[in-house]
Image: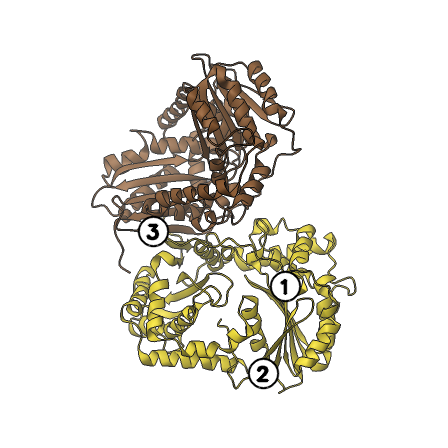
Chain colours: A yellow, B brown
Amino acid sequence: MSPSASPSTGPEISTVTLHNGLQIVVIPDHRTPVVTHMVWYRNGSADDPVGKSGIAHFLEHLMFKGTEKHTQGEFSDVVTALGGQENAFTSVDYTAYFQRIAREHLKTMMEFESDRMTGLVLTDEIVNPERDVVIEERRMRTDTDPGAQLGEAVSKALFTHHPYGTPIIGWMHEIETLNREDALAYYRRFYTPENAILIVAGDVTEDEVVHLAEATYGRIPSRGEAPKRVRPQEPEPRASRQVSLADPKVEQPSLQRYYLVPSYTTGKPGEAEALDVLVQILSAQGTGRLHRDLVMEQHCAVAAGAWYQSTAVDQSRLLLYAIPHPGVSLDTLEKALDGVIHDVITNGIEAKELARAKTRLIADTIYAQDSQASLARMYGASLATGSTVNDVKSWPEAIDAVSAESVQAAAKAWLERRRAVTGYLLKEEVAA
Amino acid sequence: MSPSASPSTGPEISTVTLHNGLQIVVIPDHRTPVVTHMVWYRNGSADDPVGKSGIAHFLEHLMFKGTEKHTQGEFSDVVTALGGQENAFTSVDYTAYFQRIAREHLKTMMEFESDRMTGLVLTDEIVNPERDVVIEERRMRTDTDPGAQLGEAVSKALFTHHPYGTPIIGWMHEIETLNREDALAYYRRFYTPENAILIVAGDVTEDEVVHLAEATYGRIPSRGEAPKRVRPQEPEPRASRQVSLADPKVEQPSLQRYYLVPSYTTGKPGEAEALDVLVQILSAQGTGRLHRDLVMEQHCAVAAGAWYQSTAVDQSRLLLYAIPHPGVSLDTLEKALDGVIHDVITNGIEAKELARAKTRLIADTIYAQDSQASLARMYGASLATGSTVNDVKSWPEAIDAVSAESVQAAAKAWLERRRAVTGYLLKEEVAA
């Protein structure tokens, strides 16, 4: 989840803003006559109004329900008929819609996508059954899965005040209250050209894209200003937290440890980069310290790793996790995990580990450029969370500048127990 | 914290609503020529707008800053000069102002109190220094006290979505942003006759009070409707949570266990009553099960008890706590505490315990009537959280109707680990 980059050898990425505030990013890729067309809105579940959790994700569903010009399903049918693919996703910070299609159909995609930026038609007959679909989606994914339930509880314990703690899909009792008026109010507030980023990657030039965008998105009137995100910020954590869930349905116990840490948007220069390198050192496939110490040497885990949601508007999360070896308690496993962190904080990292981590991180972003859609998605996520095209472009140099001392300092500053929530997923009911 | 009652032998309490929506409650008490004059607003810290935590409490401070008619401090000076006392408090559900004074000055109190319901004058010169006072208040009370910090973290872990998890005084980073516009907007929204309850206890008759209220509060124009409380509700808890804070400043380790439970307002008939009786059985002075088992028999605690915030608009909290005997770990203490709960759930309670608990609860409310201010406060808290005068009056009968089975059922239903947050305050830093 790193904001990725085009090193100087990569494609010439450019950005332009239309008169109505729509930001356009063009990522040329002339290997095949295909384009990836994405619109990103700078609003996600963390922007859901109080008591209306799930509305961002619900609206993503409703965006497929037809407009004044096009009937329900028409856009999707056209994409399929033209041999394309489409999808959409809602995150805590953004909502995005995309199609991948032969280059000659880019204008058609723009016509449909710009049409549903303002022309959505919502009636009770459309909204109410779709709400039942979301309710069923939540029931299937979360309400019968102990791991998902623990995940929600851990998130809520990590983000106690900031809305990152609320599930993207929403809380059931609030989803049940979402109605047409809520959806329309949300749509009118956030689906505006000033709040959107158009990303086109593929066999196109900037001139072509801007020309087509002006003829489609350009017809949407300016709304004046981009909507503001109104989010309470997380207070400084003071106490370490633990969340336990024991259920007969659990087949594999597991340990997770989340820390509240800076993101690329909130961190001081170099801070998020140091955390990216740290996570790489802890979790690189085969050579990561968590795997080496817990799986290979101490035989207390069958798997262990780390992950860092570095791309985020506000303070974010860094995860360490481990699956215990059969017969090993989560308590023993946690002590071993703490030992790995304690070692980095106390003794720092080795020069060769640092070099290997940087090489891997930078190489991964170069490989990612091989996928048009991955590259478009990296730019979209970074720009929608407050980074600039130049931030993304210069990211490899920023990673290269990370020192062993800054990695140790980041571990010491951020992997503090008072900043952490530890989650325990247990195989069966503990005695009352 | 039980909504208290006037059994049939108590005073004749009456309630009247003025034409502008102000509810008046009169509690006659002719033993001394003194009155308690209180105004309760049905808004507390749980009604603070998102990102503006602390505004209810901040406005309580600002209410002493003078109006168009009266200079800053004039009201307080008059109360003092007339030999009276005054105070104010902000809770999660309400904010209240009161004076206790000789009966002949009741009208003067009403004039001042009704004046500041609409006439408050706020300038930056008044608001900004008072914000610094609140910031200092928070710093003193919380930011240097590990017990208070743990308390905040435990509340946040218990109320993960509902604003009861936010401290009444607010989060520091949000208090720092509160300004004149925030205060005025909040004042205009909530300080209205429809949102207020006037309670007068003491040497007065209903006729006198209504007559005086019409001449003072009655001059405030109606605002049409009472403001609405907009609060996200807590989702059903799924995972047990633990919060730990270790600090060198801790002199006395302690264990606290909070459960998310119904209040008198949210519970089904008899549910909150059963919890009131349960808490009495667990924590009655000298005879409570927690004291008996943990302090007297097992010698693992020097003190132990329980508490239930039964009077609340939304789902509320029930606390069990224990202070370990020197040399006893919190882990050992917690197992003993769990044993006490397990015993109630499994084996229920004895008939004589039930009888003793009911007698004590009902007697306590009769004793409370001896204090004019306590009685007024009980009515205020109950009415401001959704109970009626009749609910309060008939409370002793409702307690009397609680059965041993319903106490056991309440323990089983609500003292579940998944509903609980356990807090550990520890004497020194744990090893990293």
Graded by Cα atoms within 10 Å as few (under 14), some (14 to 19) or many (20 or more), the crowding at tag 2 reads some
CB-based contact (under 8 Å), mark 3 and mark 1? no
User: Mark 2 is on which residue type?
Assistant: Glu
- Residue named by callout 2: A12
Q: Disc 1 on helix, strand or loop?
A: helix
Subunit ID for the residue under disc 1: A
In the rendered image, residue B72, in percent from the top left (x then y), is placed at 48, 32
The image quarter containing residue B400 is top left
> With A339 as the anchor, is B372 left or right in this view?
right
Mark 3 Cα within 10 Å, few/some/many (few <14, many 20+)?
many
The CA distance from mark 3 to mark 1 is 42 Å
Give the vertical position of B10 relative to A58 (above or below): above
From where the camera sits, is residue A178 visible? yes
Give the Cα distance between marks 2 and 1: 24 Å
Check disc 2 and report its element: helix, strand or loop. Answer: loop
The residue indicated by pointer 3 is: B244
Q: Is residue A169 visible from the viewing direction of this image?
A: no
Closer-to-camera residue (B230/B119): B119
Q: In the depicted view, which residue is nearer to us: A121 or B402?
A: A121
Between circles 3 and 2, the one closer to the viewer is 2
Can you tell which mark lies on residue A119?
none
